[in-house]
Image: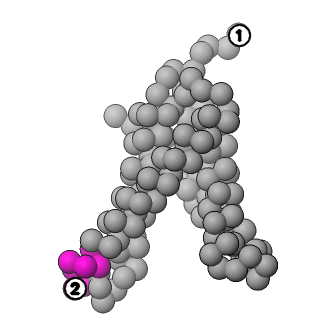
Amino acid sequence: MIPARQAMLFGLVGVVGFLVDAGVLTLLKDWLGLYGGRAVSFFCAVAATWLLNRAFTFGGRASGHGPLKEMLIYLGLMMIGGAANYLAYALLVAHSPLVAAVPVLGVAAGSLAGMTFNLLTSRFLLFRHAAPASG
């Protein structure tokens, strides 16, 4: 079971990640193009959300890995979550006339699917250990 506080913090961190993603893309799109800028902005957003989730959302938990390995695992999990997001979107667009007519509904459903996947994998696969007591 995931505590409601963790789910809420994960969602808030996701909003920050979106803002980082959109901001970096806006800054880089004229220089790197829409695709190159998006690649950089995605990695910036992953780095920002990893740092914030590590410190706040899962502050009382540990991965058991060093920071670099932890971030690389987090990146991999977020990429799989992105695939879950797109898969949910694509399935709904293909099989629901309503979503095909109003694709923002598919984007919302995909975002929810991706966020749920990312929260579960972050909590149960990466930050799965109780943090050692300090003192």
Kindly identify the amino acid type of the residue bearing the numbered disc 2.
Pro
Q: Please tell me which residue is depicted at 54% across the width and 40% down the height of the picture.
A: 73
Q: CA distance from mark 2 to mark 1?
A: 58 Å
Which corner quadrant of the image does residue 14 belong to?
Answer: bottom right
Tag 1 residue:
135
Q: Residues within 10 Å of mark 1 (few under 14, many from 20)?
A: few
Q: How is the image coloured?
A: one colour
Tag 2 residue:
97
The mark that comes first in sequence, 2 or 1, is 2
**Which residues lie in the magenta part?**
92-98
Residue 68 lies, with reference to residue 46, above or below; the image says above
Q: Is residue 44 left or right of residue 79?
A: right
Kindly identify the amino acid type of the residue bearing the numbered disc 1.
Gly
Q: Is residue 93 magenta?
A: yes
Residue 11 spot, x, y in % from top left: 51, 53
Q: Dividing the image into 4 quarters, which one contains the C terminus?
A: top right
Residue 17 lies, with reference to residue 60, above or below; the image says below
